[in-house]
Amino acid sequence: MAPNFLELEGVSKRFGSVTALEDGSLSLGTGEVLGLVGENGAGKSTLMKILGGVMQPSAGAIRIEGAPVSFATTRQSMAAGIAFVHQELHSFANLDVAANVLIGREPRQGPFGLFVDRVESARRVKPLLDRLKADFAPHTPVETLSIAQRQLLEIARALSLDARVVIMDEPTAVLTPQESDILIQFVKDFAAKGNSVVFISHKLKEVMAVADRVIVMRDGVVVDSVLKNETNEHELAKMMIS
């Protein structure tokens, strides 16, 4: 079994008297695709937002390769090798694809680096789009992209960070079946190279197609962890509600 790259132990989140997450514990192996399932409000997004540095836990510990870490910001999480592909899209419609992928990290040129090097930006971004089999180019204006294409752009941005862990929150929600198949194959190839993925989805068929192991959450608690070959869609659905 591959060693754990990431571990969360007893992670909780409270908002005043409301507990959104209680004792969230899980591990993620190197090169593993971990499915994360549960009904709306089960605590999935809260747990992953803590891991992504979007919010801070009320209690609990996070370890990377056995060393304790804490993320006060998304930048700190990214620096540790974690990238988050949010369900909500965060693209800038007035920029092109390359500018969106490299936002804040653009190659510069000219006196004092005053200007963005658009040629170099496109050169860096094109291989990422090719890996995703995207049907648009680095120079394509984002305002012309479909919702599904913008989702692929978000994934390309995560890849550009050289992340070792990519968290995907409902990544196929706006994709066609054909686009979903491409994404699932990409996830498998990405993990085969020693990277890890947390795949959050309500689509249990896709979870079973892509995940090595599945974590089930209910009412803010991790209730089970099962290997894919030891469960099925029906059993996962039962665990989610009872």
Image (spheres, helix red, strand yellow):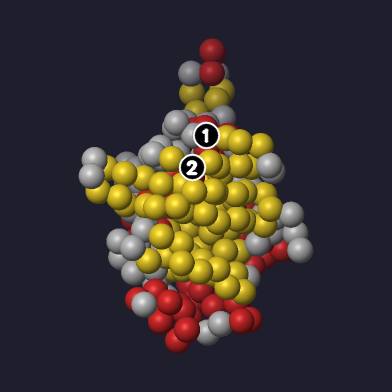
Residue 160, visible in the rendered structure? no
Q: Is residue 39 left or right of residue 59?
A: left
> Mark 1 = which residue?
70
Query: Which image quadrant is residue 17 in?
Result: top left
In terms of sequence position, does the residue under pointer 1 or pointer 2 come before the other? 2
Give the residue drawn at x 61%, y 59%.
131
* Tag nearer the camera, 1 or 2: 2
Q: Position of residue 60 (x, y in %)?
A: 48, 42
Query: Which image quadrant is residue 80 in?
Result: top right
Element carrying mark 2 = strand
Q: Relative to the observer, which residue lies in front, 152 or 56?
A: 56
Give the residue drawn at x 37%, y 52%.
21
The amino acid on which the numbered mark 1 sits, given as a three-letter code, is Ser
Q: Relative to the observer, which residue lies in front, 63 or 172?
A: 63
Task: Tell me, for residue 60, which label it has, or none.
Answer: 2
Which residue occupies the extreme left position in the image?
17
Which residue occupies the extreme right position in the image?
1
Q: Is residue 41 left or right of residue 113?
A: left
* Placement of the C terminus among the 4 image quadrants: bottom left
Packing grade of label 1 (10 A; few <14, some 14-19, many >=20) is some
Q: Is residue 190 left or right of residue 238?
A: right
Q: Relative to the observer, which residue lies in front, 55 or 181?
A: 55
Q: Position of residue 89 (x, y in %)?
A: 35, 52
Give the residue drawn at x 43%, y 40%.
59
- Vertical placement of residue 59 versus 25, above or below: above
